Image (cartoon, helix red, strand yellow):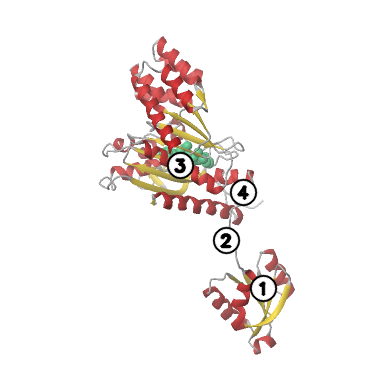
Amino acid sequence: MPEFQTVRGMRDFLAKEAAAMKYVEALTRELARLYGFQEIITPIMESYELLAAKSGEEIRQRMYTFEDLGGRKVALRPEFTASIARLMASTLRNEPKPLRLYCFGSLYRYDEPQFGRYREFWQSNYELIGTSRPEADVEILSLTNDLFQRIGLRDCHFKIGHVGIVKGILSAEGMKEQSQNRVMQLLDKKQWNDALTIAKKLKVSEKCLDTLKKVFEIKGEDSEKVLKEIKKTVKDHEKAVTATENLKEILMLLQKGGVELDMTIEAGFARGLEYYTGIIYEVTVPELDVSIAGGGRYDRLIELFGGEPVPAVGIAHGIDRITLAMEKQQIQPKTMLGMRVMIVSIGEEPRGEALKIASMLRNAGVPVELEVMGRTVSRALQDADRKGATHAIILGPKEMEKQEVTLRDMKKREQSTIKVQNLLEEIRKTQA
Ligand code: HAM
């Protein structure tokens, strides 16, 4: 048994997995560029209070929390949104709106490790800050749809809700924010009966309980029909009606803009994070039973951290789960392999020349690996094959005198003697 292993829940990413992650990362960054999001980098560690403020009970209990040597209570970030809201309430508070911010990096949650659930995982996170207009909500959904289409993921399903529906009903009963959050947490865990029991304990009226029960049952793919049903059910609760209208406006704009999502609208849908105030969504694929993305609108978080009231909406895509979904759907990450050359010298003599040829090719943008193990030509060629080199250049002392080398096309298994000065041209020719 080796002495050390990774800490439970932490993983090493070897070349193949790292390449898949980097491929998805590159696509998320390209989407940021196309939609005008600027990348920012925030610290992995933040003050515990900041991260705990509105992350929700579930995440709060699973944070990696500790005291630093200065006695500060700190935690590893379980998400990006709190850090961005902190920035908006401080350094970025006077920036012209809207702001479109993109982050990519690792997050930490002490979740029970299982398929698709890790203690260290990666997100691409997008926040559109400064407007409550439905165009912004639509933009985040459209960007997400574009990302998954570019990756080639099939059958992505969007689950969509609006926290203002249930919260609108509860607040009309005078229920405090904290109690509302308890109800929402149970809904997030799909414990509808427990949510009703808690509401009953908190002395909401029979009529309200009846409405809640009906609301929890409303869901469907025909958004027009579902929205009509919600509106009818919540008609006596003004705030819930406003929330339904907001959801309708967003979904209609989505439709008008030609963004076709495969979606279910669920009136009793809730998410674990406590800062949401408007539309919320999660994306799944049939091959995984965990979401590959999640987000929503949060219009009061920045204000809570001491800033101006600034409306905002955002989403985070789970990179680990996206690569798992790609594997399941047999989608290969596109890697820019291109030419890769291995240089082998026979004996000691041509070693200097080998270095010079390597530099010449690298300067022309060709990736080169020098044989550094002192292997025989046949062993070196086996190694080049294993590594997927497209060419091998073999330097023998006699050929070198004539400024010539042997160029081997590894795929065709053919080789010829050529002048050093023609090497680059020849390699490029065989690649084309
Ligand atoms: P979240 O739903 O907690 O939202 O996380 C978003 C995504 O991160 C999930 O859909 C999932 O793909 C991935 N994820 C979460 N936990 C794990 C885990 N333990 N292992 C692997 N992947 C995981 C947020 O984080 C919000 N900050 C999103 C947001 C941005 N809302 C507004 N703006």
For marks 3 and 1 on the same chain, the one whose residue lies earlier in the sequence: 3
Residue on which disc 3 sits:
142
Q: CA distance from mark 3 to mark 2?
A: 27 Å
- Mark linked to residue 331: 4
Residue 171: name its quadrant.
top left
Q: Position of residue 220 (x, y in %)?
A: 52, 25
For marks 2 and 4 on the same chain, the one whose residue lies earlier in the sequence: 4
Nearer the observer, disc 3 or disc 4? Answer: 3
- Mark linked to residue 392: 1
- Name the amino acid, label 3: Ser
Q: CA distance from mark 3 to mark 1?
A: 46 Å
For marks 4 and 1 on the same chain, the one whose residue lies earlier in the sequence: 4
- Name the amino acid, label 2: Met
For marks 3 and 4 on the same chain, the one whose residue lies earlier in the sequence: 3
Q: CA distance from mark 3 to mark 4?
A: 22 Å
- Within 10 Å of disc 2 (Cα), the crowding (few <14, some 14-19, many 20+) is few
Q: CA distance from mark 4 to mark 1?
A: 30 Å
Residue at point 41%, 20% (across, down) = 231
Residue 325: name its quadrant.
top right
Residue 312: name its quadrant.
top left
Residue on which disc 2 sits:
336
Q: CA distance from mark 2 to mark 4?
A: 15 Å
Nearer the observer, disc 2 or disc 1? Answer: 2
Query: Between residues 335 and 432, which one lies in front from this camera angle?
Result: 432
In the picture, the quarter occupied by the C terminus is bottom right
| Secondary structure category for the residue under label 1 | strand
